[in-house]
Image: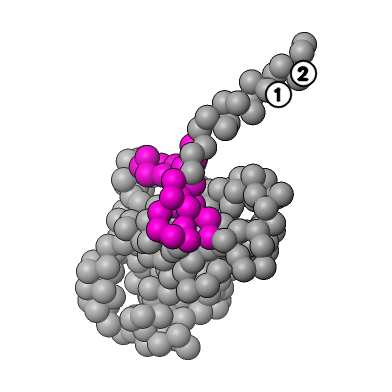
Amino acid sequence: MNVEAIQQTICSSLCADVKIVQQGDDLLCVSTPFAFSDGDSYSIYLQGLQTGGFRITDIGGTLMHLSYDNDIGKLREGTRGKVFRQIISELDLSEDDGEFYIDSPADRLGANIFRFGQAITRIHDLTFLNRVRVESTFYEDLREKLTAHVDAESIHENYLVPGLESAANYPVDFFIEGFARPLYLFGVPTREKAMLTTIILQHLNAAHLDFRSMVVFQNAADMPPKDVSRLMNAANDMISSLDADEAFERKLRAVA
């Protein structure tokens, strides 16, 4: 294998895909193969620094692009926020009022442009936690939605029902006091959780406890119909998605 020839081929291919276009007196647009999932190219620009070198910046384009389909505020909260701050730290990225940038010496410009592209890619990947919630963020969002409608002090998480046999094996995600009957609410982001919630509700019902149950799915349409049917038979109320705001508020009012 001719390593030098392979390196030259790769370098020439990469260089062919990178173009610099003058935009204004002090701004250069860097066209690269980097693109978002919808095909739009990353916003990457160069600004000369008085101290020498260049500022690699997106001039705010990344967050503006992501805001079209996402709540940008969510990127800085909970699990997403922790990962967001980790990305900023690991890639030595700076931020100023929604603009991401890296100040680079001229001799490190190529490497830092690729590092900047990597940072934008990882920030973009965070938005998948909005569209396909992993379990941890789903419960954060469910808790936030609950506190928008009921007093936070009335919410008890991982509640063990007093007097219930083997209560530790049948925890309730959220017990919300203050209603005419105790409200036991369960979040269901996965099929496994749907099956577990069915078992817990069947056990609670068999104990002849006085309560009302509500199930909130991440997305009921993604669940096997038989699992949804079994859960429907065990629960009093079901909400098909955490994004069904009107149904969530209406059903909470109905049990008041």
**In the shown orientation, is residue 205 left or right of residue 156?**
left
Q: Position of residue 24 (x, y in %)?
A: 40, 58
Specify the segment rendered in magenta.
Answer: 21-47
Residue type indicated by callout 1: Gln
Q: Residue at x 76, y 19 (%)?
A: 4
Outermost front residue? 25
Q: Position of residue 22 (x, y in %)?
A: 43, 50
Question: Can residue 65 be spotted in the picture?
Answer: yes
Q: Residue at x 44, y 46 (%)?
A: 21
Question: How many numbered callouts?
Answer: 2
Q: Quadrant of residue 226?
A: top left
Predominant SS along the magenta part: loop
Residue type indicated by callout 2: Val
Q: Which coloring applies here?
A: one colour
Instruction: Report if the CB atoms under discs 1 and 2 are less than 8 Å apart.
Output: yes
Question: Can residue 204 be spotted in the picture?
Answer: no
Spatial distance from mark 1 to mark 2, Cα to Cα? 6 Å
Identify the residue under disc 2.
Answer: 3
Identify the residue under disc 1.
Answer: 7
